[in-house]
């Protein structure tokens, strides 16, 4: 593919950000943050990128504590065969949690996950919440911490996520959610709704 196609993609992505922000400000009380180091390097979801920087960050003002929308620029470590490496524009939402979860990864469960689980159980399941356990794949580093943090309110908020394809990673008290698909106003709103509800519901 020609580099002009890649350039067009970047321009299109950049144009999506103002539209996404305008929609966000219509639905939430939003303030642009100053420089905050969100320590994105601690998250394994960015392991395929040599650099991830925040190009813009916005605080969503909630009743109990703020949550954040982050627009990032990511540099992949490797390009597909025959392609030059181009920066990718993503959007993520971040929240700070009361409980220390240890390290947690949550995503929708696939058929492959279910088969692997039969052979070598590794995920955390909740016997009292079969709907959650059947829907999501949850890997944890510390089962006791994760169980203490993943109460009914927390699970209900995750069950109500309206994004089809997402990953949640928690490192101790910090949660990030999103995916590497193109930025869109719809995705920004879905992410904002999730972290805002999380911060409001899960004291």
Image: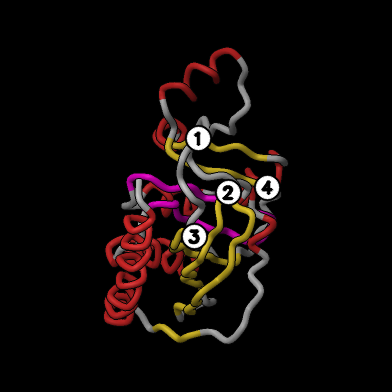
Name the image quarter holding the N terminus.
top left
Image quadrant assignment for residue 189: bottom left
Q: From mark 1 to mark 3, how far is it between C-alphas?
A: 29 Å
Q: Mark 4 touching mark 1, by CB under 8 A?
A: no
| Label 4 crowd (10 A; few <14 / some 14-19 / many >=20) | many
Q: Which residue is mark 4?
A: 103
Residue 123 image position (x, y, % from top left): 59, 30
Q: Which residue is mark 3?
A: 87
Q: From mark 4 to mark 1, how far is it between C-alphas?
A: 14 Å
What range is drawn magenta here? 164-181
Image quadrant assignment for residue 74: bottom right
Label 4 or label 2, whichever comes before in sequence order: 2
Q: Which residue is mark 2?
A: 45
Q: Nearer the viewer, mark 1 or mark 2?
A: 2
Q: Nearer the viewer, mark 1 or mark 3?
A: 3
Label 1 or label 2, whichever comes before in sequence order: 2
For numbered disc 2, what is the local secondary structure? helix
Q: Against 148, is 197 above or below?
A: below
**What's the mark number on residue 176?**
none
Q: From mark 1 to mark 2, how far is it between C-alphas?
A: 15 Å
Label 1 or label 3, whichever comes before in sequence order: 3
For numbered disc 1, what is the local secondary structure? strand
Reply yes or no: does residue 176 show up in magenta. Answer: yes
Residue 161 image position (x, y, % from top left): 36, 52
């Amino acid at each position: 593919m020609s580099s002009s196609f890649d350039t067009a993609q970047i321009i299109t992505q950049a144009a999506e950000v103002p539209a996404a922000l305008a929609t966000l400000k219509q639905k939430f009380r939003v303030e642009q943050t100053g420089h905050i180091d969100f320590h994105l390097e601690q998250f394994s979801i960015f392991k395929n990128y040599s650099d991830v920087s925040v190009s813009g960050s916005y605080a969503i003002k909630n009743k109990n504590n703020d949550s954040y929308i982050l627009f990032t620029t990511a540099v992949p470590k490797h390009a597909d065969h025959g392609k030059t490496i181009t920066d990718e524009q993503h959007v993520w939402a971040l929240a700070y949690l009361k409980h220390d979860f240890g390290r947690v990864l949550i995503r929708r469960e696939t058929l492959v996950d279910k088969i692997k689980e039969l052979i070598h159980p590794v995920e955390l399941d909740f016997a009292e919440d079969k709907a959650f356990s059947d829907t999501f794949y949850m890997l944890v580093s510390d089962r006791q911490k994760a169980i203490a943090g993943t109460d009914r309110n927390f699970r209900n908020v995750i069950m109500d996520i309206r994004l089809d394809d997402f990953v949640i990673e928690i490192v101790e008290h910090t949660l990030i959610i999103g995916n590497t698909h193109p930025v869109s106003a719809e995705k920004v709103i879905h992410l904002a709704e999730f972290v805002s509800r999380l911060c409001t519901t899960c004291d």
